[in-house]
Amino acid sequence: MWERLRQDHGSAALSLAIFAPVLVALLCMMAIAGRIQLAQGVADAAARDAARTASLADIPAEAEGAARDAALASLQRSGMTCADIDVALQTQEGTLGTSGTVTATVSCTAPLDDIAFPGVPGAKTLSATMTSVIDEWRAS
């Protein structure tokens, strides 16, 4: 039995040499997935800010510009750089006795080296949709 144990010299080092790169790659993939999820949260926050700002606008024609400005400000505060930022609004008028809603959809294309790790190729399109009730008591 002792002789068999002596024949296993170096097997631990070989196992470590095989599994260490796999473990490091798995940890990097988990970190990238986490960073992408955080970037999606930033897009959600931008859509929420855009919907709320549009719901507070006095004039419906100004709502789209205000929503776009709010989404851009939210993205800038987060430090995320996006290209092809698109803000789309959809308004639904309320029936008698109910308020209407504004739905804002924000989509942007973020480079993966910005939201993952430097050197990661490609880009990720982030999209988020949020709805806000039109404030009936806003200042006119």
Image (cartoon, helix red, strand yellow):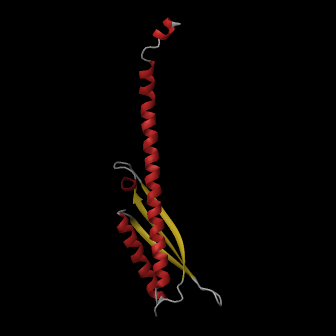
Image-based side of 97 in relation to 7, left or right: right
View extreme (bottom): residue: 140
Query: Camera-side residue: 133 or 122?
Result: 133
Camera sees residue 92: no
Q: Quadrant of residue 82?
A: bottom left
Camera sees residue 15: yes
Residue under the image location 48 percent in, 71 percent down: 47
Q: Residue 48: x, y in percent?
A: 48, 72
Q: For the image shown, how many numbered marks are present on the structure?
A: 0
Q: Residue 25: x, y in percent?
A: 43, 39
The image shows residue 7, relative to residue 103, as above or below, that is above
Q: Quadrant of residue 12?
A: top left
Image-based side of 79 in relation to 41, left or right: left
Q: Residue 40: x, y in percent?
A: 47, 61
Residue under the image location 46 percent in, 83 percent down: 63
Residue under the image location 50 percent in, 7 percent down: 2
Q: Residue 15: x, y in percent?
A: 46, 24
